[in-house]
Amino acid sequence: MRLPPPVRAAALAAVGGGRLQREFAWMSWAGTVWRLEGAAGVVYVKRAADLKAERERTLWLAGRLPVPEVLGLFHAFGDDWLLTRAVEGVPLHDRSLGWEPSRVARRLGEILRDIHAVEATGCPFGEAKKGNVLIHGDYCLPNVLVKDGRLSALIDMGGSGLGDPQVDLAAGVWTLQYNYGPGYAREFLDGYGWPPMSDKAIERLRRRYAR
Ligand SMILES: Nc1ncnc2c1ncn2[C@@H]1O[C@H](COP(=O)(O)OP(=O)(O)O)[C@@H](O)[C@H]1O
Ligand SMILES: [Mg+2]
């Protein structure tokens, strides 16, 4: 897998030193992601058909939520390439945390409550209507990073904007079941402060998240 020369040059400029010391690429949900390490830092490159929405939203969210710094958007080999600076932290389901699934579920809910409470008047993305809040848009475990037990970064913000809070609640229920099996939705919804739901309603909510 090759990086287009302008992307490589911008990555190199951002991480310092004359060359990339370590490169690692893998297939993600949306496309391909590179982790590039240089003498003075780490950057990520994401390749997908269209990353303009993610770039715009990430820029708008800076200062409101902990999101990666956008270093550039390029178009090459028929795709978009988004270059961001590495953020601190590990995903909420990372084994290094040593957290039980129920603890992960509760933290996932608490963090989501804080995201939905962010002041978002005038947000140009999504729809400003009654009941809508600032949503993440793809609220699954790999996109939520923590350090020392606290939220350190949110990534993958291409679907963020004003929206129905249940969009993120559905993703949370889905991602917990995907990673740990059923049984953790209640802890998540409690952490968020959502009113109690029946098993049937939880399953209906989970199915709203289409992958
Ligand atoms: N700026 C960043 N800092 C740290 N990790 C990142 C960064 N960008 C991407 N990653 C890592 O790459 C993974 C995939 O990136 P993401 O933007 O979520 O792609 P996808 O849309 O395919 O899920 C993330 O889950 C995270 O582990
Ligand atoms: Mg992701």
Image (spheres, helix red, strand yellow):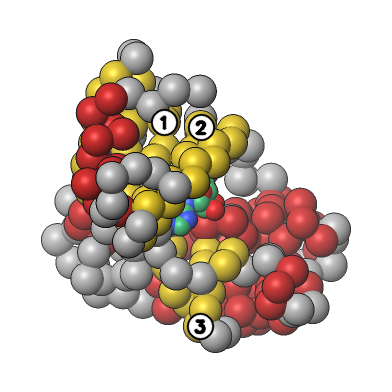
Of the numbered discs 2 and 3, the one sitting upstream in the chain is 2
Give amino acid for label 3.
Arg
Residue at point 54%, 41% (across, down): 24
What crowding class fits label 1: few (fewer than 14 Cα within 10 Å), some (14-19), or many (20 or more)?
many
Q: Which disc is residue 150 wearing?
A: 3
Q: Amino acid at mark 2?
A: Thr
- Residue 32 badge: 2
Q: Position of residue 7 (x, y in %)?
A: 28, 32
Give the spatial CA distance, label 1 vs label 2: 5 Å
SS for tag 1? strand
- In the picture of the structure, the residue carrying the numbered disc 1 is 47
Q: Nearer the viewer, residue 81 or 173?
A: 81
Quadrant of the image containing the C terminus: top right
Image: 110 above or below 161: below
Label count reads 3
Disc on res. 24: none
